[in-house]
Amino acid sequence: MHPLFTRASRLLAYFAAWLVGGILLAVPLAAITPQPFPDVIVFTVPLALLYGGVCLASWWVCLSRPLTGRDLLPSAFAQLGAALLSTTVWAIAATAWGLVLMRTRGVPADRTILLHDVTLLFGIGVPLYLLSAAAHYLVLALEDSHAAAQRALALQVSAREAELRAVRSQLNPHFLFNSLNSINALVGSDPEGARRMCEGLGDFLRRTLQLGARESVTLAEEMALVDRYLAIEQVRFGTRLGVERAISAEAAACLLPPLLLQPLVENAIKHGVTERVEGGRLSLSARCEAGRLVIALENPVDDDARTPEGEGMGLVIVRRRLEALGDARLVAVRTGGRFLATLSLPAETAHESGAGAAHA
């Protein structure tokens, strides 16, 4: 379908432009031939509107004859032939209209003037049609460009979602491996603790599957999952593991990808509790500032321990997920016997996300 037919306002604007063109066309005709300007307008305006409709046909010629590669020259000849044919039809219609006006209004005064006017219209019609064809080719090029941009965006979104799924698939095996190691450490020394840990692990994995299937969860839901994970680890470490929380109500309502904090908590326990004889206390805080959700997780580290090269699996997983999301980042710093991991991502609530989707 022609783009002008999709909206009545576009079609009206198009023919309004041809109406103005018909008035402007009357100026040279009235100047060249001794005819009153109103009489010439009666002759030119209906013809201009008619030719405006004829020029719309160039859209389908453009569709059938695209300007690509080896089709360029045949397309140019096809447009030229369509221009000559359309202008010939227009000239015949102008002759017939002129004869009608001569009989009913005495305009133009004689057939010589009419012939002169029709010849001038024929000379103007060919370039007008070709100009219309050029405009249609431009519209088609813009549509192709827009469609290509939409396809590229769709591919980019699909690639990002595939990357997120691939990275997310690494979470459960990584966590399960560490949890089984913890259970194995308790089997000999504390069988009852190992049993409770297995029960907690089963409950945790069920909830992990529920939340992991969603695109986003609130920080409060994520923290509930983290609490269950900490309860599992509490069986293993007892009083050696301490946790401090400072989560604002505003931050708790913000959305984030599921299972984003758990790898960071794992990392903090590994370096802040497991590798220290006296254990350690984790400090977890979340706040909203300047339209962003900022989550900070801090744990002590053993100053005598060798600093590992690179980053642990937990940090790598989280960083890759944030990179796939786009406007989010993770900063990890070790200073003064403390390790601080800071997450920063847009502060968006479920209400805002739903309103944005509805608006789109």
Image (cartoon, grey):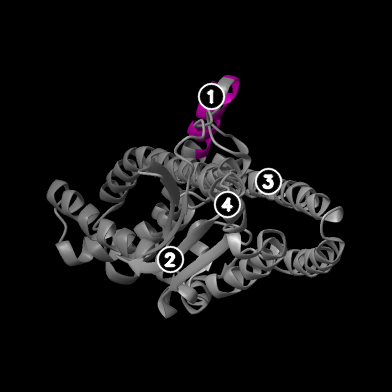
Quote the CA–CA distance across marks 4 and 1. Answer: 72 Å
Quarter residue 46 falls in: bottom left
Amino acid marked by disc 3: Ala
Q: What secondary structure predominates along the stretch shown in magenta?
A: helix
Sequence-wise, which precedes: disc 1 or disc 3?
1
Select label 4 or label 1 by which is in front: 4
> Is residue 322 toward the left or the right of residue 116 in the image?
right
Mark 2 lies on residue: 285
Quote the CA–CA distance across marks 1 and 3. Answer: 40 Å
Sequence-wise, which precedes: disc 4 or disc 1?
1
Amino acid marked by disc 1: Leu
Residue at 60% in and 46% down:
160
Quote the CA–CA distance across marks 1 and 2. Answer: 65 Å
Residue at 40% in and 53% down:
95
Amino acid marked by disc 4: Val
Q: Residue furthest top?
A: 70
Is-magenta flag for residue 191?
A: no
Sequence-wise, which precedes: disc 1 or disc 2?
1
> Which contiguous range is marked in magenta?
70-82
Secondary structure category for the residue under label 1: helix
**Residue 251, image x, y percentages:** 43, 72
Sequence-wise, which precedes: disc 4 or disc 2?
4
Specify the label residue 244 is tagged with.
none
Residue closest to the eye, 95 or 140: 140
Mark 3 lies on residue: 162
Mark 4 lies on residue: 273
